[in-house]
Image (cartoon, grey):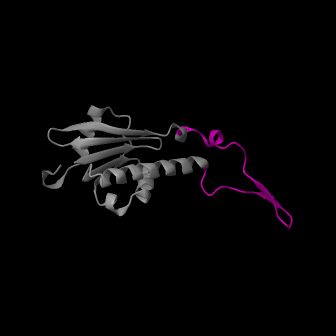
Amino acid sequence: MTWVVTTDSNTCRIYHYQKKPAEIKLIKEIKHPENKLKNVDLVSDGPGHYEASTSGRGTYSPHMDEKQVLIDNFSREIAKELDHGRNSQKYDNLIIIASPHMSGLLNQHLNKNVKDLISHNIHKDTLHLSDHELLEFIKAHAKFPNGGE
C-alpha cells in the first residue's frame, strides 16, 4: 500500500494511492492555520532588553522566529503521523510531495524506518490541485521500477 503526503507550511493531506486502477483517497488532513499568521500577530510583545555592565544596551533576538517554530512543530507532527501509520502497517511505500523548504523540515523529523519507505520525494506545492489533478500529477511524476505499486 502506498501513502501520498502533500503538504505546505500549514496544511497536510495524507492519501491512500492505488496504482491500478489509479485512484487516491483522502485519509487524513492536518491543518495549522496559525502558521499563516505574520510574526507580529504571533508574538504578544517585543523582544527582551538587557543592560550590559559596560556601556551599552541590547535586545535579545530569538534563534528562530515564532512562525518558523510553529512550522517546525507542524513538520514534527506530520512525521509522528507517518511513523504511527508505519507502525500500524497502513503503508509500505511513501510518496512525499512538498516544497523544498517543507520537505527539508519534514526530513529532519522523520525516523530512519519511515525514510526507508520513501520511494519519491517530489519538491512541488500541489495542495491547490483537485484530487483528480493530483492523481494525474502522481501518475506523471511517480514512476515505479518494475511497475510496482
Q: Residue at x 50, y 50 (%)?
A: 73
x and y percentages locating residue 68 in the rendered image = 55, 50
Residue numbers of the magenta segment: 36-65
Q: Is residue 123 visible?
A: no
Task: Check if residue 45 falls in the magenta segment.
Answer: yes
Q: What count of labels does the image hold?
A: 0
Q: Residue at x 78, y 55 (%)?
A: 49
x and y percentages locating residue 140 in the rendered image = 23, 43
Quadrant in the picture for residue 113 = bottom left
What residue occupies the far bottom of the structure in this picture?
54
x and y percentages locating residue 67 in the rendered image = 57, 46
What residue occupies the far front of the structure in this picture?
88
Residue 109 vertical placement versus 4 (above, below)? below
Main SS, magenta region, reads loop
Task: Check if residue 142 falls in the magenta segment.
Answer: no
Q: Residue at x 45, y 54 (%)?
A: 105
Q: Is residue 50 left or right of residue 145?
A: right
Q: Is residue 110 visible?
A: yes
x and y percentages locating residue 62 in the rendered image = 65, 55
Q: Residue at x 36, y 43 (%)?
A: 6
Foreground pick, 136 / 5? 5
